[in-house]
Image (tube, helix red, strand yellow):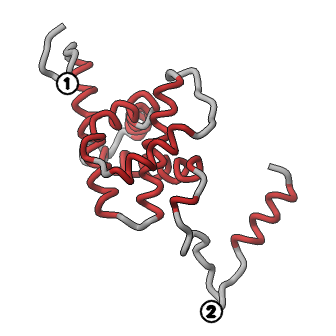
Amino acid sequence: MKFSQFKLLVDMMFTPDEQGGIKKRYDGVDVRQMHPLVLAYIGDAFFHLFVRTRLLSYEQAKVHALHAFSAQIVSAVWQHKAYLGIEPMLTDEEKAIYRRGRNAKSHAPRSSSVAEYHSSTGFEALLGALYLSEKFERLQEISEASFDVISRAMMAEIHGNTTEGTEEK
């Protein structure tokens, strides 16, 4: 980011509102009009925090292990699998947000396929839209279901099962 862009962003962020406080810039913004990669940016941050918090139920002392495991869970590969598992529970509006995120122009890293990366971007856009719309109950429901899908799929993979623990290899 160029210094002039950074300065403009800082000036916008810290401009006081009418009461002298810092205004939340997304107030009154229609998330359906927001760029899907911005929604994915927020959704990614939310899911990282959600997963890290969830993992505290299992381990509190080994920070390196927590970091490594959470990084794997929030990877494009596992988020893609999570989306496939939760898709039946989504509304048409939520599926439309996912498609906008999935179809946004972005570049996939080498750690996942292009399809998995785009799918994970759609998943993150959905979470970001729910967060910014302050639909926290639905966000929690989808996040918990996603964590459950990922957990079961990881266990199936560890134990050599091909379909979520129902078939042996």
Horizontal and vertical percent for residue 137?
29, 63
Eyeballing the image, is 70 above or below 2?
above
- Other-residue count near label 1 (Cα within 10 Å), few / some / many at <14 / 14–19 / ≥20: some
- Position of the C terminus, as image quadrant, is top left
Name the residue carrying label 2: 19
Q: Residue sitting at 47 percent across and 50 percent down?
A: 43
Q: How many marks?
A: 2
| Residue 48 visible in the current orientation | no
Specify which label sits upstream in the sequence, 2 or 1: 2
Farthest right residue in view: 4
Q: Quadrant of residue 106?
A: top right
Q: Is residue 100 left or right of residue 53?
A: right
Q: Which mark is residue 53?
A: none
Q: Amino acid at mark 2?
A: Gln
* Local SS, label 1: loop
Residue drawn at x 22%, y 15% as measured from the top left: 162
Q: Secondary structure at mark 2?
A: loop
The quadrant holding residue 103 is top right
Residue at the spot x=51%, y=59% of the render? 32
Real-space CA distance between mark 2 and mark 1, rounded to the nearest whole angstrom: 54 Å
* Residue 164 disc label: 1
Q: Position of residue 84 (x, y in %)?
A: 32, 33
Location of residue 57 with respect to 11 vertically, above or below: above
Where residue 3 sits: x, y (%)? 86, 55
